[in-house]
C-alpha cells in the first residue's frame, strides 16, 4: 500500500515538474515575442512621428503661403 501511494506521489511530482518546464519554455517564447512586438511598435511610432512631422511641415508651409 505504501509503495502504491509513493508511486502515485512520485508520478504527480513528475507531472508537476514537467508542467513547470513546459510553462518556463512557453514563458521564454512569450518574452521573445513581446520583445519583437515592442521593437515593431517603436518602429511604427517612429514612422508615424515622421509622417506627422511632414504633415505639420506642409500645414505650416500652407499657412505661410496663405498669409503672404
Image (cartoon, rainbow, N blue to C red):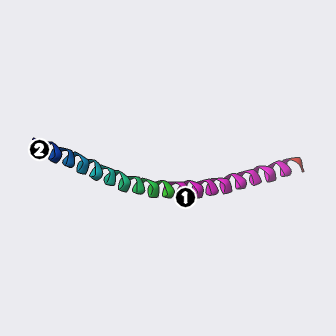
Determine the residue positioned at 33% across, 50% down.
20
Residue 43 among magenta residues: yes
In the picture, the quarter occupied by the N terminus is top left
Q: Residue furthest left?
A: 1
Q: Residue furthest right?
A: 68
Residue 9 percent location from the top left of the image: 20, 44
Q: Secondary structure at mark 2?
A: helix
Q: CB atoms at circles 1 and 2 under 8 Å apart?
A: no
Determine the residue positioned at 67% across, 57% down.
50
Determine the residue positioned at 19% across, 48% down.
11
Residue at the spot of label 1: 39
Q: Nearer the viewer, residue 47 or 18?
A: 18
Q: Main secondary structure of the magenta part?
A: helix
**Label 1 vs 2, first from the N-terminus:** 2
Residue 37 percent location from the top left of the image: 50, 54
Residue 29 percent location from the top left of the image: 40, 56
Q: Secondary structure at mark 1?
A: helix
Does residue 48 appear left or right of residue 3 in this picture? right
Does residue 60 appear left or right of residue 29 in this picture? right
Quarter of the image for residue 43 reads: bottom right
Quarter of the image for residue 12 reads: top left
Residue at the spot of label 2: 4
Q: Nearer the viewer, residue 3 or 27?
A: 3
Q: Nearer the viewer, residue 53 or 18?
A: 18
Between the C-alphas of marks 1 and 2, the distance is 53 Å
Magenta part of the protein: which range? 37-66
Q: Nearer the viewer, residue 47 or 55?
A: 47
Amino acid at each position: 500500500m505504501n509503495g502504491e501511494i509513493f508511486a502515485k506521489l512520485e508520478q504527480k511530482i513528475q507531472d508537476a515538474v514537467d508542467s513547470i518546464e513546459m510553462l518556463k519554455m512557453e514563458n521564454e517564447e512569450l518574452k521573445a515575442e513581446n520583445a519583437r512586438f515592442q521593437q515593431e511598435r517603436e518602429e511604427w511610432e517612429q514612422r508615424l512621428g515622421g509622417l506627422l512631422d511632414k504633415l505639420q511641415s506642409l500645414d505650416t508651409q500652407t499657412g505661410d503661403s496663405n498669409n503672404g
